[in-house]
Image (tube, coloured by chain):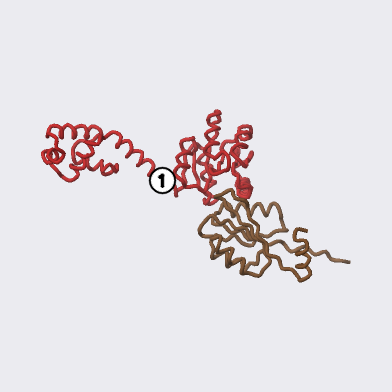
Chain colours: A brown, B red
């Protein structure tokens, strides 16, 4: 008899100095994704956020960078230096600029060649 | 207890959805509608008959303040709470003048938002603690402006002399006017500043930033 394995829940980190945003989005994720997503942390400062990246290994990080306690450039620099294949969504509550998604993918040589041939495939 | 009916207006969909989730879980509130712009809110909010409309201030198109003004002009009397990241004085004053009952910053804790909404539903006016200082500044400046409008240029010169401790005759000689004219200016100053003597006039002028 084959055993079905549940997919690992997507680990989400919500970084914001704004409690309404943090708590609100945590509820949205819980309601929308149930067991498929797990909010592993809701850091409110840059230091907490960087520590959480290393200790909590999130798959997705949502960063509200309005508050100076979470510096967008510093965060992105750390993201670029890192290795783990996480996605980052940058949002700002202060402006209506589009939400930006950064994605770091690790590809094998064959996947890289395929991607170069058809990057949007 | 009947739930307090809320309508949420914010262009930031992630924030709006999260806020609705938070408010819906609090127990006292029922979110009867939401909108992503001021224009949409004008069309849909009145039909939803909310007790309180929560408005973001900075939105593309109609701002929250413009939306509130338009709702009031159309005769809608629901309470309004501005929920914003803006601490700009223009936004704050604009919101108050448009008839907002509250002005809360988005960095508020959920419990504070809950308490503010309950207060607003009871007809109270509420401001974020971070911005009350700005309201005081605006009031002080308005008072200074009123006093400055009342007091003439010559009277201001006399006030400055009084502040330096000059006597009537010294002021007359300093400003090249007669002592009687100095006395007339001082009498007008006491009336305009609503004070009883020269010392009080100087104190009030200093307090109001006139000199």
Left or right for B109, reference B31: left
Assign a secondary structure to mark 1.
Answer: helix
In this rendering, the answer to whether A11 lies above or below B199 is: below
Decide if residue B1 is in sight here: no
- In this rendered view, identify the residue nearer to me: A73 or A11: A73
Q: Quadrant of the N terminus of chain A?
A: bottom right
Q: In which quadrant of the rendered view does residue B135 lie? A: top left
Decide if residue A83 is in sight here: yes
Q: Residue furthest right?
A: A1
Q: In which quadrant of the rendered view does residue B45 lie? A: top right
Residue A117: give x, y in percent of width and height. Answer: 78, 63
Left or right for B179, reference A120: left
Badge 1 density bin: few <14, some 14–19, many ≥20, Cα 10 Å: some
Looking at the image, how many numbered discs can be counted on the residues?
Answer: 1
In this rendering, the answer to whether B193 lies above or below B16 is: above
Q: Quadrant of the C terminus of chain A?
A: bottom right
Residue ID at (38%, 44%)? B137
- In this rendered view, identify the residue nearer to me: A65 or B135: A65
Residue A45: give x, y in percent of width and height. Answer: 53, 61
Residue B60: give x, y in percent of width and height. Answer: 58, 43
Q: Which residue is mark 1?
A: B134
Residue B168: give x, y in percent of width and height. Answer: 12, 38
- In this rendered view, identify the residue nearer to me: B46 or B25: B46
Residue ID at (73%, 58%)? A36
Q: Residue furthest bottom?
A: A109
Q: Residue furthest front?
A: A117
**Chain containing the residue with disc 1:** B
Residue ID at (65%, 57%)? A101
Residue ID at (18%, 37%)? B197
Left or right for B144, reference B154: right
């Amino acid at each position: 008899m084959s055993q079905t394995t549940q997919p690992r829940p997507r680990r989400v980190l919500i970084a914001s100095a704004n409690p309404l945003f943090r708590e609100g989005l945590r509820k949205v994720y819980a309601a929308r994704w149930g067991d498929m997503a797990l909010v592993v942390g809701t850091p409110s400062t840059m230091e907490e956020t960087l520590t959480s990246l290393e200790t909590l290994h999130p798959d997705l990080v949502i960063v509200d960078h309005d508050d100076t306690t979470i510096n967008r450039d510093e965060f992105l620099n750390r993201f670029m230096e890192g290795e783990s294949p996480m996605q980052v969504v940058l949002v700002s509550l202060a402006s209506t600029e589009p939400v930006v998604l950064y994605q770091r993918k690790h590809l094998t040589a064959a996947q890289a060649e395929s991607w170069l041939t058809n990057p949007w495939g | 207890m009947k739930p307090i009916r809320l309508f949420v207006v914010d262009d930031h969909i992630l924030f709006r959805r999260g806020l609705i989730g938070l408010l819906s879980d609090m127990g006292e509130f029922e979110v009867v509608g939401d909108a992503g712009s001021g224009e949409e809110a004008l069309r849909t909010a009145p039909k939803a008959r909310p007790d309180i409309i929560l408005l973001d201030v900075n939105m593309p198109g109609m701002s929250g303040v413009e939306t509130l003004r338009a709702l009031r002009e159309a005769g809608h009397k629901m309470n309004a709470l501005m929920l914003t990241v803006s601490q700009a004085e223009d936004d704050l004053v604009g919101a108050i003048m448009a008839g907002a009952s509250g002005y809360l910053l988005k960095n508020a804790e959920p419990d504070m938002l809950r308490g503010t909404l309950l207060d607003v539903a009871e007809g109270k006016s509420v401001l974020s603690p971070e911005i009350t200082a700005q309201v005081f500044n605006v009031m002080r400046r308005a008072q200074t402006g009123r006093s400055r409008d009342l007091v003439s240029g010559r009277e201001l010169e006399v006030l400055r002399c009084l502040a330096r401790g000059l006597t009537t005759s010294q002021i007359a000689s300093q400003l090249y006017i007669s002592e009687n004219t100095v006395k007339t200016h001082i009498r007008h100053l006491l009336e305009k500043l609503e004070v009883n003597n020269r010392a009080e006039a100087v104190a009030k002028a200093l307090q109001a930033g006139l000199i």
